[in-house]
Amino acid sequence: DVVLTQTPSILSATIGQSVSISCRSSQSLLDSDGNTYLYWFLQRPGQSPQRLIYLVSNLGSGVPNRFSGSGSGTDFTLKISGVEAEDLGVYYCMQATHAPDTFGAGTKLELK
Amino acid sequence: EVQLVESGGGLVQPGRSLKLSCAASGFTFSNYYMAWVRQAPTKGLEWVASITNSGGSTYYRDSVKGRFTISRDNAKSTLYLQMDSLRSEDTATYYCTRGAGIGWGQGVMVTVSS
């Protein structure tokens, strides 16, 4: 199975600070169809996950544009440009290029 | 409004069975592949099983192969997960998801314990 390694595991930030989360894959996530099936999710405390980013860099519906995704191959990054209080929670990357779908272990974003 | 509502969870003894349902509304259910993702208490997300939009193909994580069966009824816009021979390590909140996590249900708790 593809292993997704997220760093850091815990991220402390102040409101307004810009932060980045890394997701590294044990295999290239570029599919033979030319797409890279890498996604980012946020799970707020006590809530279901919410998709933020799809196909590496596409913003989900209703997701604020302070979120951005980038990367290719095996290295991917989620950036939050100006953390807001509602952004606190656990962030997960997920790949669906190689069966089975797999998730990273998560990055907890907390207030400093 | 897109909604996914899971039901059927509860406390069950090891070795017994449970069937989860996920009622979908607000979108054309038959157009989407669907999946079950679970989250053990205080742990991360773990994909469990997926099914194509027609139901013609299904996929499972190794640890549930032969014990869990994912299915769907497109006429009823409902996704199912039949869970047999349950183990304590299956204890988790089970989420129904649309496509590649486009939408998630509120989750249903399954506790396997004697």
Image (cartoon, grey):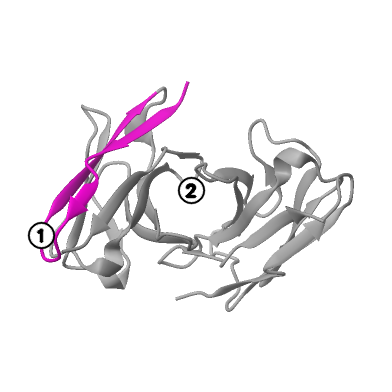
Magenta stretch? B1-25
Q: Residue at x 86, y 45 (%)?
A: A15
Closer to the camera in the image, B24 or A70: B24
x then y, percent, for residue B12? 16, 55
Residue B47 location, quadrant: bottom left
Name the main secondary structure of what is drawn in magenta. Answer: strand
x then y, percent, for residue A109? 71, 56
Which label sits on residue B3? none
Closer to the camera in the image, A54 or A16: A16
Closer to the camera in the image, B95 or A84: A84
- What is the C-alpha distance between the residues marked 1 and 2? 30 Å
Q: Residue at x 53, y 46 (%)?
A: A49
Badge 1 or badge 2: first in the primary sequence: 1
Q: Which residue is mark 2?
A: B100
Q: Residue at x 56, y 67 (%)?
A: A105
Chain name for mark 2: B
x then y, percent, for residue B50? 33, 53
Question: Label 2: few (<14), some or many (≥20) within 10 Å?
Answer: many
Type of amino acid under label 2: Ala
Name the element at disc 1. loop
Type of amino acid under label 1: Arg
Question: Label 1: few (<14), some or many (≥20) within 10 Å?
Answer: few
Residue A32 location, quadrant: bottom right
| Image quarter in which the C terminus of chain B is found | bottom left
| B87 left or right of A105 in image | left
Chain name for mark 1: B
Q: Which residue is mark 1?
A: B16
